[in-house]
Amino acid sequence: MKPPASPPLSSLRPGGAPEPSDADRHWLRAAIALSRRCPPSSTAFSVGAIVVDATGAVVAEGYSRRDDPHDHAEETALRGIDAADPRLAGATLYSSLEPCTQRTSRTRTCTDLVLATAIPRIVVAWREPAVFVHAQGVERLRGAGRTVVEVGELAAEAREVNTHLLA
Ligand SMILES: Nc1c(N[C@@H]2O[C@H](COP(=O)(O)O)[C@@H](O)[C@H]2O)[nH]c(=O)[nH]c1=O
């Protein structure tokens, strides 16, 4: 039997709108799939992140604790690219959880790291519950003029890998 055909690259171009597109759902599901690769933790969430450029090509990806026990997903994804890379000006960052605004382990939060780039649009599945820190990534990014799209229909999928942290 023939394997299912991959969607053409043109259909994987991130949307530019405040509403999620089918391509946005595709990439956010891919970020959630990355979150399942996180080394397990009882003190931090498992998160996946992917940066996709305006043509629908993956620029970078990462997940929590990938290279070090304190790593966050967005941090690992952005570590591999120059913050001034021109592709970022038309890119969308997909993260299974909103980027953090408070950390105990490192000084630069994921929201700071995103704001140090020109990434104009961030798509998230889930806001961080106040289990470890009080996160305000969605508000901070919007306040800085970035478009933030929340895809509530994928929140349960993003939470699933983290259910052991939630009462
Ligand atoms: N893992 C993770 C986040 N999650 C949370 O940020 C909180 C503070 O981080 P830390 O002080 O470094 O432990 C911690 O509760 C962790 O679960 N946030 C993110 O933006 N991306 C990530 O990949």
Image (spheres, rainbow, N blue to C red):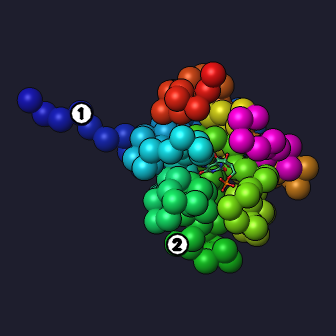
First reached walking from the N terminus: tag 2 or tag 1 = 1
Q: Residue 80 carries which label?
A: 2
Amino acid at dot 2: Gly
Element marked by disc 2: loop
Which residue is depicted at the point 46% across and 65% down? 67
Q: Is residue 26 above or below residue 111?
A: above
- Nearest the viewer among 28 and 109 is 109
Depicted 76 relative to depicted 23: above or below: below
Residue that carries the numbered disc 1 in the rendered image: 4
- Neighbourhood count class around disc 2 (C-alpha, 10 Å): few under 14, some 14–19, many 20 upward: few
Query: Is label 1 in a helix, a strand or a loop?
Result: loop
Looking at the picture, tell me which residue is in the foreground, 48 or 53: 48
Q: Residue at x 52, y 72 (%)?
A: 80
Q: Quadrant of the C terminus?
A: top right
Q: Which residue lies furthest to the front in this view?
A: 42
Instruction: Using the image, determine if residue 63 lies above or below residue 7.
Output: below
Q: Give the range drawn in magenta.
A: 130-140
Main secondary-structure element of the magenta-colored stretch: loop
Give coordinates of residue 36: x percent, y percent. 42, 41
Badge 1: residue crowd in 10 Å (few <14, some 14–19, many ≥20): few
**Mark 2 vs ligand 1: CB under 8 Å?**
no
- Furthest residue in direction right, as rendered: 143
- At x 66%, y 33%, the residue is 126
State how far apart marks 2 and 1 are (Cα).
31 Å
Mark 2 vs 1: CB contact within 8 A: no
- Counting from the top left corner in percent of width and height, residue 72 is at 59, 56
> In this view, which residue lies farthest toward the left?
1
Q: Is residue 3 left or right of residue 57?
A: left
Spot occupied by residue 92 in the image (x, y as percentages of width and height): 63, 53
Query: Which mark is in front, 2 or 1?
Result: 2
Type of residue at label 1? Pro
Q: Report whether residue 84 is seen.
A: yes
